[in-house]
Image: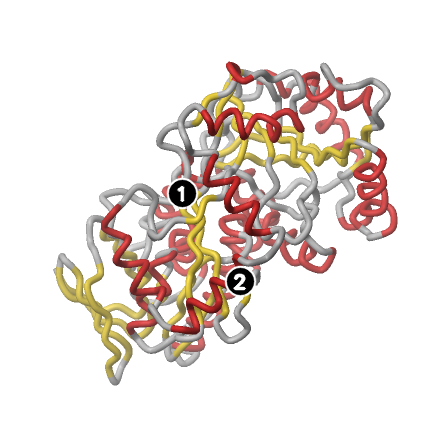
């Protein structure tokens, strides 16, 4: 096969699929193609078993500043609105209670400051502080077995969207394929991208594609391709593999713990699986791996392409991993994957959420977990916790939009505007129609919603 397109998107995970949907449905670009190397859309990190299934709003993520929460909130509401409008049967998502739990005087005080003094209560109207008795009504196992003399507080909201990002990606692609100007090619691996006078030539295992503009949304591989084209030379990757432990029917919704200070990785939390609420997942763990995809030895060489094997990369890794908080954390996470020993070592993390859990109640989830690339800035020898995006000449590389899939539509909206600039302003983006189809469906906090929210909390044990 071969073809000439205005825009070619490389990568069919949630990032590439959301951009395809946005450009296909809400711009007048003449021709768009999406290329995915796997036989199916969203087969790697966007698959439901390979991520935490969380839609991050910034309300219960205690490592977010108010400014970051404001930025993330709109992105989450765009996707939540899309799900509300396009998934009435809850095939792509479930909506349940979620909370961040504080136990003991220090953690309770932290949550009180966050809600009252730092502005999170004002930013999120549905977020509310609840104490032990109400926590027990919503999540009985969180209180059961806990010292009755220990102070407890949670910040809770009904906006606990649990998302199957794989099915959501497929939904985006299906809607885009309704348009006659869109082609989708799966099982098509990119072997080379070459700049031309008019854009790019993309060589694949299935033929050649020529395009005026391209967006590479291939996860960790995006930086690999960027480096081959001369971009991102001051960046390397710290690939982090996440795993989960499973238990039977312990939680109705999502329960976060407070973020450990100075750690860039998500706090351990427990939540009911998006498709089976009788399965409770705890995690994620965070193990460093020298590969770009979980369980694929072939991507080890890809990692070394990205790593670069140079002094700046080695010094950056050494500087990051020598941190007195990060290093012990990394070493502990290596142990969690060891058979028999791992579950025992991870158990205290589970008991922070559900105190009555015993060792025989949990097991490591086999076949779960993906790889999330953390970006390392070799100039500053530090982790770059912002959005990992490189914009070049008529090309965008999305490595890991922060915070991942939650802001996929907001990222797609920005990339669409950039792509239109690449195409010399020949096309237009109907942003008002885009917003009407997405964030326009997001339920706001008003009297009617408060009644619906109460009903949702009452019914959370039977949802999905």
Residue drawn 87% across the image and 46% down it = 116
Q: Which residue is mark 2?
A: 387
Q: Is residue 309 left or right of residue 61?
A: left
Crowding near the residue tagged with mark 1, few <14, some 14–19, many ≥20 C-alpha atoms within 10 Å: many
Q: Position of residue 247 (x, y in %)?
A: 51, 19
Q: Is residue 229 left or right of residue 284?
A: left
The answer to whether residue 57 is visible is yes
Q: Position of residue 25 (x, y in %)?
A: 42, 56
Crowding near the residue tagged with mark 2, few <14, some 14–19, many ≥20 C-alpha atoms within 10 Å: some
Q: Position of residue 152 (x, y in %)?
A: 81, 28
Give above or below for 40 relative to 264.
Answer: above
Q: Position of residue 440 (x, y in %)?
A: 61, 48
Q: Secondary structure at mark 2?
A: loop
Residue drawn 34% across the image and 69% down it = 308
Residue drawn 56% across the image and 63% down it = 386
Who is closer to the viewer here, 309 or 202? 309
Who is closer to the viewer here, 457 or 131? 131
Q: Secondary structure at mark 1?
A: loop
Q: Quadrant of the N terminus?
A: bottom left
Total count of labels = 2
- Residue 212 — which label? none
Q: Which residue is mark 1?
A: 370
Q: Earlier in the sequence, mark 1 or mark 2?
A: 1
Q: Nearer the viewer, mark 1 or mark 2?
A: 1
Q: CA distance from mark 1 to mark 2?
A: 19 Å
Q: Is residue 303 left or right of residue 201?
A: right
Residue drawn 46% across the image and 40% down it = 334
Who is closer to the viewer here, 3 or 380? 380
């Amino acid at each position: 096969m071969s073809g000439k397109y205005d825009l070619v998107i490389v990568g069919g995970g949630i990032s590439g699929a959301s951009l395809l949907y946005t450009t296909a449905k809400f711009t007048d670009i003449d021709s768009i193609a999406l290329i995915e190397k796997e036989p199916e859309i969203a087969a790697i990190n966007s698959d439901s078993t390979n991520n935490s299934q969380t839609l991050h709003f910034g309300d219960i993520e205690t490592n977010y500043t108010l400014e970051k929460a404001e930025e993330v909130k709109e992105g989450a509401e765009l996707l939540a609105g899309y799900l509300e409008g396009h998934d009435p049967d809850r095939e792509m998502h479930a909506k349940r209670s979620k909370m961040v739990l504080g136990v003991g005087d220090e953690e309770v005080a932290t949550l009180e400051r966050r809600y009252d003094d730092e502005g999170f209560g004002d930013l999120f109207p549905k977020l509310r502080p609840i104490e032990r008795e109400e926590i027990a009504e919503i999540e009985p196992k969180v209180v059961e077995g806990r010292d009755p003399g220990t102070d407890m507080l949670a910040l809770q909201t009904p906006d606990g969207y649990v998302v199957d990002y794989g099915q959501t990606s497929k939904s985006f692609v299906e809607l885009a394929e309704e348009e006659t100007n869109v082609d989708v090619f799966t099982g098509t691996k990119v072997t080379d991208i070459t700049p031309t006078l008019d854009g790019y030539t993309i060589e694949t295992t299935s033929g050649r594609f020529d395009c005026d503009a391209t967006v590479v949304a291939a996860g960790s591989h995006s930086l690999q391709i960027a480096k081959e084209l001369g971009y991102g030379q001051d960046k390397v990757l710290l690939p982090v593999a996440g795993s989960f432990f499973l238990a039977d029917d312990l939680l109705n919704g999502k329960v976060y713990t407070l973020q450990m200070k100075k750690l860039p990785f998500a706090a351990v939390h427990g939540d009911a699986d998006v498709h089976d609420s009788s399965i409770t997942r705890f995690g994620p763990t965070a193990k460093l791996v020298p590969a770009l995809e979980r369980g694929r030895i072939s991507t080890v060489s890809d990692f070394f392409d990205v790593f670069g094997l140079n002094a700046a990369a080695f010094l950056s890794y050494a500087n990051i991993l020598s941190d007195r908080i990060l290093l012990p954390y990394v070493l502990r996470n290596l142990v969690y994957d060891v058979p028999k020993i791992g579950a025992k070592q991870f158990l205290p993390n589970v008991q922070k959420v559900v105190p009555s859990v015993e060792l025989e109640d949990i097991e490591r989830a086999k076949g779960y977990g993906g790889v999330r690339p953390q970006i390392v800035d070799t100039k500053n020898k530090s982790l770059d916790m912002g959005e990992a995006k490189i914009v070049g000449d008529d090309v965008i590389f999305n490595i890991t939009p922060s915070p991942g899939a939650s802001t996929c539509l907001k990222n797609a909206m920005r990339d669409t505007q950039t792509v239109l600039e690449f195409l010399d302003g020949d096309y237009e983006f109907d942003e008002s129609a885009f917003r009407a189809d997405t964030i326009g469906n997001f339920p706001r906090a008003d009297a009617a919603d408060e009644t619906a929210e109460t009903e949702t909390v009452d019914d959370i044990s039977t949802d999905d």
